[in-house]
């Protein structure tokens, strides 16, 4: 089984090197916007493009990824909102199990149904414990998942959830306040979770400023994901990337 992308996640973590992932929702980004994101992404030394969305209504997933791959060698990682969001053109797929919720369909049910398609894709599959944290208002992910998010002030529940995910064999933990969250995940929660797991920790949802990205890395996040804020102001790519990469070798 392929492991190149996961090896990058883990070796960066070992080196204390923080990464920045730009989230592209194929429903929202047209060809021109993708070109611009790729160009700025290369200039800003973005580490990954995450591609996916809670809905993905259009059928442009393959085309969007092919367009990114044609112009740059930044790895493309699928962050699927549903089992249909599989594209053989990507480099890897975050195989998400919603471990913060109690909806059996998103813990294992949809995985059973999609397993043959996912395997046939030939993609690198990275088992990911996905934790949705309350971001201050209902987000698309909290509505679609039909599962209660983790309370934002319960860092101990988040920590135990992430620990359980790691001990169940998951390779990454992704803590998400949901796209466009009013309130991003607190540094207190990030600190507690990251100090109790040894697998890489991805943090996203509602991050709109370079300072917040920097503080999240300092608190222990290994990968910062930003989508919404960059859709509104594409120039933020450079500032947030610089803030994340300024954290090199910070160990907490
Ligand atoms: C959402 O973590 C991602 O699933 C990114 O969130 O769009 O708010 O940056 P934003």
Image (spheres, rainbow, N blue to C red):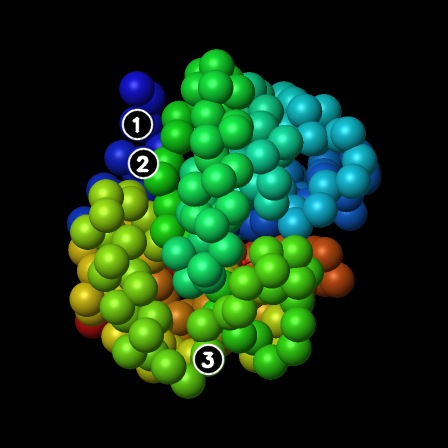
Earlier sequence position, callout 3 versus callout 1: 1
- Which of pointers 3 and 1 indicates the residue nearer the eye? 3
> Is 224 on the left-hand or right-hand side of 192?
right
**x, y percentage for residue 182?**
63, 77
Earlier sequence position, callout 2 versus callout 3: 2
Asked if the residue under mark 1 is in contact with the one under mark 2, i.e. CB atoms within 8 Å, the reply is: yes
Indicate whether 132 appears above or below 97.
below
Residue that numbered label 2 is attached to = 6
Q: CA distance from mark 2 to mark 3?
A: 28 Å
Residue that numbered label 3 is attached to = 152
Residue that numbered label 1 is attached to = 3
> Is 147 on the left-hand or right-hand side of 197?
right
For disc 3, the neighbor class at 10 Å (few under 14, some 14 to 19, many from 20) is: some
> Is 126 on the left-hand or right-hand side of 212?
left
Farthest-out residue, bottom: 153
Q: CA distance from mark 3 to mark 1?
A: 33 Å
Indicate whether 147 appears above or below 35.
below
Occupied quadrant, residue 35: top right
Q: CA distance from mark 2 to mark 1?
A: 5 Å
């Amino acid at each position: 089984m392929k492991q190149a992308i996961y090896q990058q996640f883990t070796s960066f973590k070992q080196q204390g090197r923080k990464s920045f992932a730009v989230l592209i929702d194929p429903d929202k980004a047209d060809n021109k916007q993708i070109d611009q994101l790729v160009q700025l992404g290369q200039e800003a030394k973005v580490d990954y493009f995450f591609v996916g969305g809670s809905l993905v209504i259009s059928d442009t997933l393959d085309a969007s990824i092919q367009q990114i791959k044609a112009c740059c060698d930044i790895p493309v990682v699928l962050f699927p909102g549903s089992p249909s969001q599989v594209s053989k053109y990507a480099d890897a797929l975050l195989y998400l199990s919603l471990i913060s919720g109690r909806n059996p369909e998103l813990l294992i049910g949809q995985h059973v149904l999609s397993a043959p398609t996912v395997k046939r894709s030939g993609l690198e599959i990275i088992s990911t414990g996905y934790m949705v944290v309350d971001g201050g208002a209902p987000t698309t992910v909290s509505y679609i998942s039909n599962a209660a998010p983790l309370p934002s002030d319960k860092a101990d529940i988040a920590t135990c959830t992430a620990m359980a995910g790691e001990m169940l064999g998951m390779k990454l933990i992704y803590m998400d306040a949901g796209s466009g969250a009013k309130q991003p995940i607190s540094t207190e929660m990030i600190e507690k979770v990251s100090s109790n797991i040894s697998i890489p920790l991805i943090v996203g949802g509602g991050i709109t400023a370079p300072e917040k990205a920097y503080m999240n890395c300092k608190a222990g996040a290994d990968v910062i994901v930003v989508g919404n804020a960059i859709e509104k102001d594409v120039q933020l790519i450079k500032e947030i990337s610089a803030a994340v990469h300024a954290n090199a070798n910070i160990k907490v």
